[in-house]
Image: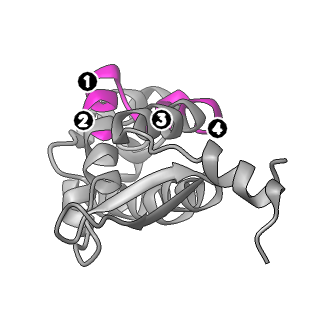
Amino acid sequence: MITEASIDQLERVSVIAPREVVSFIWAICRRIVPSPLLGEPSNWRILRRNISKFIQLRKFEKFSLKECIHELKISNFLLSNKHHADLHGGCGELGISDIARHAILQCWMFWFFTSLVSPLVKANFYVTESEHEKQGCYITESLLGRN
């Protein structure tokens, strides 16, 4: 049954631009994840662009791990940075190869997108199909828990 309250909620639903969603997700990620795990500022721009590509996917599109780490520089992450590792007794002393550092970055980015970015989108936004664009999606604020 449709009530005045449900009509009120429907009127408040507005489509949110993907760039606003990306800004929201990035702000939360910057608060939760320690800066060294996000790499240097040059990697931040690349990571934010990759999050944007993820947010703008259409209904049947997929986002591979390769796309998650596209253009990220392994050397700009504290976990795998040889200079920092030598100073702090990390990867450099253990003799971890570039292949291993790349594997660590892949595991980290997989976790970042599957356990942080995706759940944040699901918890805070409602993604629905668009009638105007072929296979497109609208992003609206989630009304769950808000009155």
User: Is residue 81 visible from the viewing direction of this image?
Assistant: no
Q: CA distance from mark 2 to mark 4?
A: 18 Å
Q: What residue is disc 1 on?
A: 42
State the residue in front, 27 or 90.
Answer: 27
Q: Earlier in the sequence, mark 4 or mark 3?
A: 3
| Residue 19 covered by magenta stretch | no
Q: Is residue 129 left or right of residue 24?
A: left
Q: Earlier in the sequence, mark 2 or mark 4?
A: 4
Q: Residue at x 80, y 48 (%)?
A: 146
Q: What residue is disc 2 on?
A: 46
Q: CA distance from mark 1 to mark 2?
A: 7 Å
Q: CA distance from mark 1 to mark 4?
A: 19 Å
Q: CA distance from mark 3 to mark 2?
A: 12 Å
The type of residue carrying mark 3 is: Trp
> Circle 2 — which element?
helix
| Residue 45 covered by magenta stretch | yes
Q: Earlier in the sequence, mark 1 or mark 3?
A: 3
State the residue in front, 80 or 2.
Answer: 2
Mark 1 vs 2: CB contact within 8 A: yes
Q: CA distance from mark 1 to mark 3?
A: 15 Å
> Circle 4 — which element?
helix
Magenta-highlighted residues: 30-47
> Circle 3 — which element?
helix
Q: CA distance from mark 4 to mark 3?
A: 10 Å
Q: Residues within 10 Å of mark 2 (few under 14, many from 20)?
A: some
Q: What residue is disc 3 on?
A: 26
Q: Residue at x 28, y 53 (%)?
A: 56
- What colour scheme was applied to this rendering of the protein? one colour
Q: Quadrant of residue 30?
A: top right
Q: Residue at x 28, y 67 (%)?
A: 131
Q: Residues within 10 Å of mark 3 (few under 14, many from 20)?
A: some
Q: Residues within 10 Å of mark 1 (few under 14, many from 20)?
A: few
